[in-house]
Image (cartoon, rainbow, N blue to C red):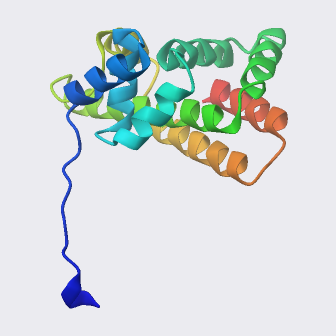
Amino acid sequence: ILSRCQLMKFMPYSLEELEAYIIEKFGIEKSIANQYARLSEGNLSMAVSLAKEGEKDLSTNLFNWLRTSYKGDAEEIQSFVLEFTSQNLDHQIQFIEYGLHFFQNLYLWMVTNGSHHNMTTHEIDVAQKMKNILTAENIEKLTSELNQTITYILRNANPKLNIFSTTIRVGDI
């Protein structure tokens, strides 16, 4: 019954609040807590979920994966695939979501000439290096690949084939 319901609006937590909570509750290093707070975009539940997975540096893992993809070395790709698929599904999805988050912010950073973004200094350093090889069109292709990868993960596709083929396709972009 609508007359008995009261609509309550909850504002998202600030980056600083989430970061402080994660550090206090889980004892996670400040740089990783900052990464989780940025990725969760004010959502406490998502930040807690990321922190419960353990202290993983998603940005370093993403950038290493991109290097591996662009190099195209089959042994390195296989090594990454085995490491990636040894993680649980939630962590696999969080990794891909972090990639989407990074590319969204990279696009915003590129379009605004660095004036508007939600990136850490480490991410900005990587963005500086990538701006010569990535165009807006390439970022769109990368985000499409990552979205497709999440869809396949959620549909229980073979995880090794899924991330292996994604890695190869990303290297071709």
Q: Nearer the viewer, residue 143 or 120?
A: 120
Front residue of 172/150: it is 150
Task: Give the tally of numbered discs.
Answer: 0
Instruction: Relative to 47, say whether 25 is above or below.
Output: above
Q: Does 159 appear above or below 72?
A: below
Residue at the location (18% across, 50% down)?
A: 11
With respect to residue 28, does 85 lie above or below? below
Locate residue 155, reporting x and y percent: 74, 54
Q: Is residue 18 left or right of residue 57?
A: left
The quarter in which the N terminus is drawn is bottom left
Q: What residue sits 74% from the left and 15% below the top?
A: 72
Q: Nearer the viewer, residue 16 or 58?
A: 16
Measuring from the top left, give residue 74's x and y in whole percent. Answer: 83, 14
Question: Is residue 106 visible to the viewer in this orientation of the structure?
Answer: no
Q: Residue 150: x percent and y percent?
A: 63, 45
What residue is at 68 percent from the left and 11 percent from the top?
A: 71
Within the image, what quadrant is residue 83 found in? top right
Q: Quadrant of residue 16?
A: top left
Q: Quadrant of residue 93?
A: top right
Find the residue positioned furthest to the left: 115
Q: Name the side, left or right, on which 6 lies relative to 87.
A: left
In percent of the image, x 83 and y 36: which residue is there?
161
Instruction: Give the percent coordinates (x, y) of residue 17.
Output: 22, 28
Q: Could you tell me if residue 149 is visible in this image?
A: yes
Examine the rendered structure and indicate whether residue 133 appears above or below residue 40.
Answer: above
Residue 48 placement, left or right of 66: left
Q: Looking at the figure, which quarter contains the C terminus?
A: top right
Does residue 16 appear left or right of residue 147 in this picture?
left
